[in-house]
Image (tube, helix red, strand yellow):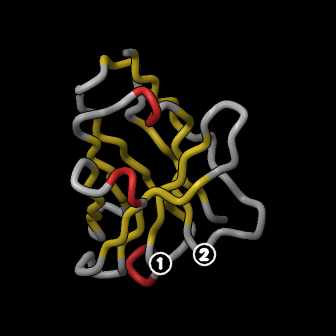
């Protein structure tokens, strides 16, 4: 079955960088666009970034444009989120997902905390 395992979250100072990873299994990874979401405490989950199947197309939440990049390695069934110039408002649990996952499925996520 579909499994998405996020990792790489940590506590960092404002202005710092992190690279998140999402290891996927249980489906043909290269056939699906991938997305990163985040959920801050007391906030709704929001779409942060998305990447096309071959990695040639990307989209970003306005507030992270120019600071975050998304990439994928189809040979490793992994999608990445490089986060630079982090801000306290980037704090939250970060999740990856795709349309191969059953409705309502979410991995355990990875916690990103940015201190001011």
Discs 2, 1 touching: Cβ within 8 Å: yes
Q: What element carries label 2?
A: loop
Taking the image as shown, residue 23 lies to the left or right of residue 4, namely left
Q: How far apart are marks 2 and 1 (CA)?
A: 9 Å
Taking the image as shown, residue 109 lies to the left or right of residue 104, namely left
Q: What residue sits 52% from the left and 47% below the top?
A: 5
Q: What element carries label 1?
A: loop
Observer-nearest of 105 and 70 = 70
Observer-nearest of 74 and 110 = 110
Q: Position of residue 34 (x, y in %)?
A: 45, 69
Q: Position of residue 21 (x, y in %)?
A: 37, 46
Which mark's residue is nearer the viewer, 2 or 1? 2
Q: What residue sits 46% from the left and 33% below the top?
A: 89
Q: What residue sits 63% from the left and 40% below the top?
A: 108
Name the residue that disc number 1 marks: 28
Determine the image quadrant of residue 79: bottom left
Quadrant in which the C terminus is drawn: top left
Give the crowd class for mark 1: few <14, some 14-19, many >=20 residues within 10 Å.
few
Quadrant in which the N terminus is drawn: bottom right
Determine the image quadrant of residue 4: bottom right
Does residue 31 sit above or below 86 in this rendering? below
Name the residue that disc number 2 marks: 100
Number of numbered labels in the structure image: 2
Residue furthest right in the image:
104
Taking the image as shown, residue 76 lies to the left or right of residue 89, namely left
Ranked by sequence position, the earlier of labels 2 and 1 is: 1
Q: Position of residue 56 (x, y in %)?
A: 23, 80
């Amino acid at each position: 079955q579909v499994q998405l395992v996020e990792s790489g979250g940590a506590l960092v100072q404002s202005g710092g960088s992190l690279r998140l990873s999402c290891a996927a299994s249980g489906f043909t990874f290269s056939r699906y666009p991938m997305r990163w979401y985040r959920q801050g405490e007391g906030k709704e989950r929001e779409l942060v970034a998305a990447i096309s199947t071959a990695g040639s197309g990307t989209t970003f939440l306005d507030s992270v444009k120019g600071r975050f990049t998304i990439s994928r390695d189809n040979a490793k069934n992994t999608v990445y989120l490089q986060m630079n110039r982090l801000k306290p408002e980037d704090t939250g649990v970060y999740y990856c997902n795709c349309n191969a996952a059953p409705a309502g499925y979410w991995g355990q996520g990875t916690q990103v905390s940015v201190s001011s």
